């Protein structure tokens, strides 16, 4: 019985060490152009992100927070809430009601 418990403990350690709880950490995602505007979001930590907007040659950048509950990510930055769905290297988010397709860089 003790041997079985030891085997289970080692197996669970192996699985947990190979599984990344939040696969977004350290990734950057860039959108296709939407009405001449491009967006970039970088997930810097488990809960912090940066968000950039490039429109008509102007660039704006802000820091925000996010939550991740597979496959949904919710970004909160400068009073704006953006919810998206992540599938492999693509994220579809809604910004001001418009769907925006992001690709992981």
Image: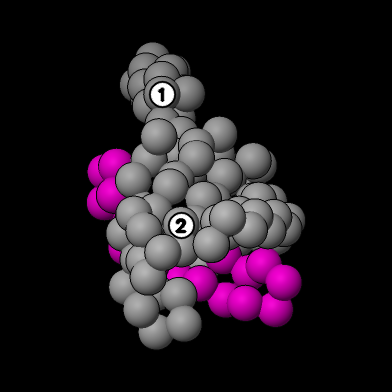
| Residue 68 visible to an observer of this rendering | no
Image point 36% across, 66% down: which residue?
34
Q: Secondary structure at mark 2?
A: strand
Q: Which mark is residue 89?
A: none
- Corner quadrant of residue 81: bottom right
Residue 12 within the magenta-colored segment of the rendering: no
Q: Is residue 27 above or below residue 90?
A: above
Q: Position of residue 90 (x, y in %)?
A: 29, 49
**Quadrant into which the N terminus falls:** top left
Task: Answer with left or right where residue 51 lies relative to residue 104.
Answer: right
Q: What's the CA distance linking mark 2 and mark 1?
A: 34 Å
Which sits in the foreground, 29 or 60?
60
Q: Are marks 2 and 1 in contact (CB under 8 Å)?
A: no
The residue identified by callout 1 is 18
Which sits in the foreground, 9 or 57?
57
Q: Earlier in the sequence, mark 2 or mark 1?
A: 1
Residue 79 within the magenta-colored segment of the rendering: yes
Q: Which mark is residue 38?
A: 2
């Amino acid at each position: 019985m003790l041997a079985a418990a030891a085997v289970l403990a080692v197996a669970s350690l192996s699985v947990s060490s190979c599984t990344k709880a939040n696969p977004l950490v350290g990734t950057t995602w860039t959108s296709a152009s939407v009405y001449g505007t491009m967006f970039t979001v970088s997930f810097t930590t488990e809960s912090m992100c940066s968000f950039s907007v490039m429109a008509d040659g102007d660039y704006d950048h802000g820091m925000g927070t996010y939550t991740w509950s597979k496959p949904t990510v919710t970004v909160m930055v400068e009073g704006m809430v953006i919810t998206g769905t992540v599938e492999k290297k693509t994220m579809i988010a809604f910004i001001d009601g418009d769907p925006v397709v992001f690709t992981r860089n």
